[in-house]
Image: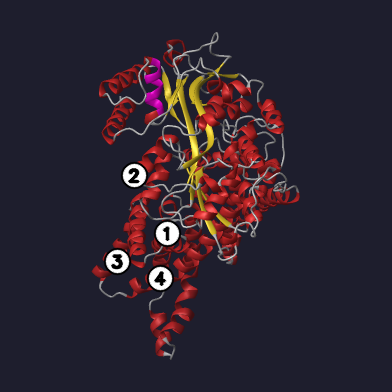
């Protein structure tokens, strides 16, 4: 029986810790693959310490975790003592039950309810940003206190109740008696509560997501925004350091508890094993941090050919105020200084003296709901075409003074005056993308050219589709020759039926998971955005790409100024800066989407860089733009009735 118990114990811990061990191993991988170890290297630790956005968010998380854990531990310990001193067992039981509610309550309920509370309070106080560092700190203290009480209360109940009263009888004040007689007995519980509060704060995403503002972004929120592309191994390096650091804290704490000679004698073997584990983990963390610091590559923020003047003299408004610009963009959608490239945000800050709070989102709908909630104020946003149309119709965008955007001449004419902004008042094009089909040439036969490949019975279980309603349904609409902006419900029904027909050959619906699936050959066929194919191709050279003959979706992401903007002149300056040739080249190389900036597209450095990624890069990025033979269609903002209808159909398709 003991052998079975030990085997079960070993299997459980294998499942718990094997993924973490794999993460640590691949953080030292010389390549970016998560399935093939190409050799030992500190490359990703170097990249990690060169990523300014990542390091700022890491620092923010540590500051928040330390401050919130200390405050929560203090309040939680006092609250536990108050519950302990209650004489009525029914009242004490009720308080303990109330304390359990926040721990059992779903995080999303807690996060949304706290956001609504802060928005309500901010409205009364007339604050611009209803959420920020203070609200985030309050939220973390709030959800940490119950866990501190949970750790401290049992220690209090097992302590000698008479010691406190005896101390009082001997002349101690209440506070002195508490610290002299009670605290030493419950110190293990206090330390456990402190460590748990620190860990929970570092780990929290959901509550932080709803209660944070643009001025203070935590690491989990930042990592979640990196869903537009696959997670790079520098994140493995970061979380390896975090994991080892927290594990070392726990080991040190446990070592401190083995101060009894009897315990040491009884557990000498486990004590020695613990010391060895601590030493090994310490070496791993020190090695990773040392490699990152020693070989850190500084970003090259030198800009030599700017057309615009970003000096204080040319922009008098910079003289009179301490300006902070809040920018809201897609995740992994701007050059961030990784591997010594241009850090666009840092370059703008150095050039102008304007502080930039940079936050990211994972979808147009998330960005829309955040701004619609009026919880925060942003100065610059980068939505897609159909969302620009919706926000413009709902008076959520401010007109842009194009006379201040001197680099607007860099934008190709074909991207100006499009359906969502015919008078060129509300946005400036940033990136252009098209949807195509990616397939594994070692599995798929011939040279396919149609959407029908995604319904081919020969590749059953090897086919993926988009995991969002608009793109997923559009794949069926294009295959059937239907209008993707139809307001006829019968057309949407036909597309839904076509998708239900696909279910028999489909492996699953994905978004960012596609990078790993196609890169590791766990799937053979998938529709996705053209620029992202280049990232997948780097991991798997058997992949090929084509635009379906029936037509495909084209989209433009553009820079806008929302109505809630507080720094209009600075926003204009930032937009003009983003259109500079050097900046546009850096962004185009980093994102790998088609650029509407003609100066960047014709730049020799850009063309050479893209040619190194793929010999057919011009077809992949610009084939559907430059050829009249490929039919492309934009998504339009549809009436709410149609949006609700196709969302309902999508749920039906996925549950079929």
Residue 336 higher or lower than 486, as above or below: below
Q: Do labels 2 and 3 touch, CB within 8 Å?
A: no
The residue singled out by tag 4 in the image is 156
2 and 4 marks in contact (CB < 8 Å): no
Residues 149 and 538: in front is 538
476 in magenta:
yes
Callout 3 environment at 10 Å: few (<14), some (14 to 19), or many (20+)? some
Q: From the top left corner, tell me how far across and down residue 514 is, in percent.
A: 51, 29
Q: Is residue 244 visible?
A: no
Magenta range is 471-479
- Give the secondary structure at mark 1: loop
- CA distance separating discs 1 and 3: 30 Å
Q: Main secondary structure of the magenta part?
A: helix
Q: Position of residue 81 (x, y in %)?
A: 38, 73
The residue tagged 3 is 95
Labels 4 and 1 touching (C-beta < 8 A): no
Q: Name the residue beneath numbered marker 1.
A: 131
Closer to us: mark 4 or mark 3? 3
Measured in 3D between alpha carbons, the distance from the residue under mark 4 to the one under mark 1, in whole angstroms, is 37 Å
Relative to residue 394, is residue 487 depicted above or below?
above
From mark 2 to mark 4, how far is it between C-alphas? 57 Å
Local SS, label 2? loop
Q: Which residue is mark 2?
A: 394
The residue tagged with tag 4: helix, strand or loop?
Answer: helix
Label 1 Cα crowd, 10 Å radius (few <14 / some 14-19 / many 20+): many
User: First in sequence: mark 1 or mark 2?
Assistant: 1
Q: Nearer the viewer, mark 1 or mark 3?
A: 1
Q: Residue at x 28, y 69 (%)?
A: 92
């Amino acid at each position: 029986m003991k052998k079975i118990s030990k085997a079960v114990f070993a299997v459980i811990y294998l499942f718990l810790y094997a993924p973490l061990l794999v993460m640590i191993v691949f953080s030292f991988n010389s390549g970016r693959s998560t399935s093939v170890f190409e050799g030992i290297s500190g490359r990703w630790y170097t990249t990690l310490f060169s990523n300014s956005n990542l390091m700022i968010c890491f620092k923010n998380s540590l500051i928040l975790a330390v401050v919130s854990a200390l405050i929560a531990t203090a309040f939680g310990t006092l609250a536990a003592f108050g519950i302990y001193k209650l004489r009525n067992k029914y009242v004490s039981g009720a308080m303990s039950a109330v304390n359990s509610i926040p721990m059992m309550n779903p995080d999303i309920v807690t996060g949304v309810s706290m956001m609504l509370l802060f928005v309500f309070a901010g409205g009364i106080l007339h604050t611009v940003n209803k959420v920020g560092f203070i609200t985030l700190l309050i939220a973390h203290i709030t959800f940490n206190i119950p866990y501190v009480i949970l750790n401290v209360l049992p220690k209090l109940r097992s302590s000698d109740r008479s010691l406190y009263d005896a101390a009082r009888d001997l002349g101690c004040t209440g506070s002195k008696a508490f610290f002299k007689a009670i605290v030493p007995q419950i110190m293990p519980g206090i330390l456990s509560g402190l460590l748990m509060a620190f860990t929970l704060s570092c780990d929290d995403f959901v509550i932080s997501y709803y209660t944070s503002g643009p001025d203070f972004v935590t690491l989990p929120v930042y990592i979640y925004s990196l869903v537009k592309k696959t997670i790079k191994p520098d994140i493995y390096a970061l979380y390896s350091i975090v994991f080892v650091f927290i594990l070392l804290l726990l080991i040190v704490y446990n070592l401190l508890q083995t101060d009894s000679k009897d315990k040491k004698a009884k557990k000498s073997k486990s004590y020695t094993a613990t010391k060895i584990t601590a030493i090994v983990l310490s070496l791993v963390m020190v090695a990773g941090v040392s490699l990152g610091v020693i070989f850190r590559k500084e970003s090259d923020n030198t800009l030599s050919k700017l057309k615009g003047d970003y000096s204080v003299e040319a922009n008098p408004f910079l003289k009179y105020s301490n300006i902070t610009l809040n920018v809201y963009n897609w995740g992994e959608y701007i050059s961030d200084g990784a591997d010594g490239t241009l850090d666009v945000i840092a370059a703008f800050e150095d050039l102008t003296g304007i502080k930039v709070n940079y936050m990211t989102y994972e979808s147009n709908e998330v960005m829309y709901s955040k701004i619609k909630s009026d919880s925060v104020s942003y100065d610059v946003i980068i939505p897609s075409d159909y969302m620009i149309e919706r926000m413009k119709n709902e008076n959520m965008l401010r007109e842009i003074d194009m006379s201040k955007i001197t680099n607007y001449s860099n934008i190709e004419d074909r991207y100006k005056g499009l359906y969502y902004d015919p008078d060129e008042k509300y946005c400036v094009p940033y990136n252009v993308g098209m949807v195509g089909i990616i397939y594994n040439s070692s599995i798929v036969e011939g040279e396919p050219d149609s959407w029908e490949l995604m319904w081919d019975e020969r590749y059953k279980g090897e086919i993926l589709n988009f995991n969002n309603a608009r793109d997923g349904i559009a794949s069926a609409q294009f295959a059937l020759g239907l209008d993707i902006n139809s307001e006829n419900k019968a057309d949407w029904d036909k597309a839904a039926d076509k998708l239900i027909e696909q279910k028999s050959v489909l492996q699953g619906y994905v978004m960012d998971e596609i990078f790993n699936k196609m890169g590791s050959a766990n799937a053979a066929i998938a529709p996705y955005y053209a620029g992202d194919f280049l990232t997948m191709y780097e991991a798997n050279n058997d992949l090929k790409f084509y635009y379906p003959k029936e037509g495909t979706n084209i989209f433009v992401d553009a820079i806008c100024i929302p109505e809630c903007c507080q720094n209009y002149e600075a926003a204009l300056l930032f937009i003009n800066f983003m259109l500079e040739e050097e900046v546009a080249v850096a962004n185009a190389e980093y994102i790998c989407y088609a650029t509407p900036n003609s100066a960047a597209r014709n730049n020799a450095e850009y063309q050479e860089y893209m040619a190194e990624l793929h010999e057919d890069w011009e077809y992949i990025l610009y084939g559907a733009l430059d050829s009249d033979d490929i039919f492309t269609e934009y998504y339009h903002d549809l009436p709410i009735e149609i949006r609700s209808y196709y969302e309902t159909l999508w749920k039906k398709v996925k549950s079929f």
